[in-house]
Image (cartoon, rainbow, N blue to C red):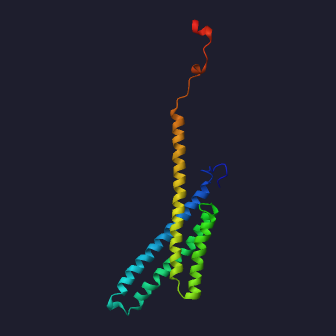
Amino acid sequence: MTSASDQTSRHGFAPLAIARIKGAQNANKVAIYLIYAAIIAFMVFGTIASIKTFHDNQLLYWLYFNLPYTLITLTIPITIYDALVIYRYRLSQPSMIALSIGISTIVLIGGLLFADTAWLGLASWLGVAFLFKSNFKRFFTFLEAENLEAESLEAADKSVPAQDASENTINSPTDSHS
């Protein structure tokens, strides 16, 4: 087990926190891949289902209609986890997190209860994953810029030659006559 003295913080973030944020970023990438898969499934199976010979195919209809919903629904727990990590480490304003998750949840539940549809609510979850993607990108860009700045300062400190002790002494009037 590592002790607290073994872990150095980078710009106020402990290595464990950075690792947790990196894990959430990777989970968000999975959510985005699921969103892309849902869009592709919708386009491919919708195109095939529109062909006259496949109009009566029940499996194709299920793949066209339910597979995109299922894939997007799988992203909801991932984006909630990402929201908790972003909120915990203050990578975004809490009001933005609450607004994105809250509106998406209200629209999804409202659509299921009152309109008997989930498409608008699930469409709003698409935006949540991409919002969190930009939050993670900004955070790691910030760390990268801070690291480059720190490295350039260290390099500048090393390139300045140390002054010799004899240059720092003031010549006395008796030294100038000899």
Q: Closer to the camera, 150 or 4? A: 150
Q: Is residue 2 above or below residue 38?
A: above
Task: Name the quarter where the C terminus is drawn.
Answer: top right
Question: How many numbered callouts?
Answer: 0
Q: Closer to the camera, 148 or 7? A: 148
Residue at the spot 52% in from the left edge and 32% down from the top edge: 160
Residue at the spot 55% in from the left edge and 60% down from the top edge: 22
Q: Is residue 162 above or below residue 88?
A: above
Q: Closer to the camera, 141 or 94? A: 94
The single residue placed furthest to the bottom in the displayed view is 56
Residue 81 at x, y percent in the picture? 59, 69
Residue 90 at x, y percent in the picture? 62, 60
The single residue placed furthest to the top in the displayed view is 178
Residue 178 shows in the view: no
Q: Is residue 129 above or below residue 164?
A: below
Q: Closer to the camera, 67 or 111? A: 111
Residue 99 shows in the view: yes
Residue 154 at x, y percent in the picture? 54, 39
Going by the image, does 48 lie left or right of 159?
left
- Residue 58 picture quarter: bottom left
Task: Name the quarter where the N terminus is drawn.
Answer: bottom right
Residue at the spot 45% in from the left edge and 85% down from the top edge: 65
The single residue placed furthest to the right in the displayed view is 4
- Residue 48 picture quarter: bottom left
Residue at the spot 50% in from the left edge and 77% down from the top edge: 123
